[in-house]
Amino acid sequence: MPSAGAAGADLARAAGLAGGLVFGLMMAMMGMLPMIAMLIGQESPLVGFILHMVISAFFGAVYGLVAARFFSGYGPNLIAGALYGVLVWIGGALVMMPLLLGMNEMVLSVGQAQWMSLLGHLIFGVITGIVFAYLSRP
């Protein structure tokens, strides 16, 4: 297991990019990337994808700072990753994104689009956890 801190964050940043890539491809197929780009005043799917990957690397690094201290192996990281995906979904997709886009009435609102977002965030978290476990193995 890597030392907690920078080494764990570096490994998890790469793991977050792996999870973000899969989630980003899902978002592209659902036409959701322009909404991500709107966070920085753009509407380009490419800009949305790039921003999504930056966000994925950040959240991957945060995962690594915690996971390097508490979890080792595939099973614990799979479960922790899934739970982390749910936390990122709640904090990001259900709270921060609506607030940043000026859609205050959508905060904590859950409809079909949000359930699909939850699935994507779960996949992000699981892949991030599994790849982190793989990269941090002795």
Image (cartoon, grey):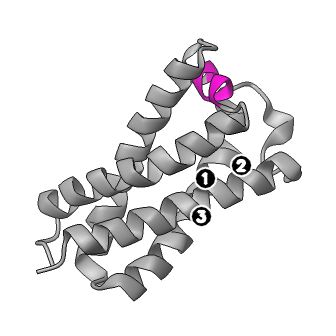
In this rendering, would 127 be left or right of 13? right
> What residue is shown at x 63% (from left), y 34% (from top)?
28
Q: What element carries label 3?
A: helix
* Numbered range of the magenta stretch: 33-38
Above or below, 60 against 46 in this view is below
- The residue identified by callout 3 is 122
> What residue is shown at x 45% (from left), y 54% (from top)?
19
Q: Assess whether residue 37 is covered by the magenta stretch.
A: yes
Kind of residue sitting beneath label 3: Leu
- Where residue 91 is drawn, which disc sits there? 1
Kind of residue sitting beneath label 1: Gly
Q: Is mark 1 on a helix, strand or loop?
A: helix
- The residue identified by callout 2 is 94
Which of the 4 quarters of the picture holds residue 35? top right
Which of the 4 quarters of the picture holds residue 38? top right
Along the line of sight, the residue nearer the viewer: 39 or 43: 43
Does any portion of residue 10 appear in the rendered image? yes
- Where residue 2 is drawn, which disc sits there? none
Instruction: Pinpoint residue 133: horizontal percent, then vertical percent.
Output: 29, 74
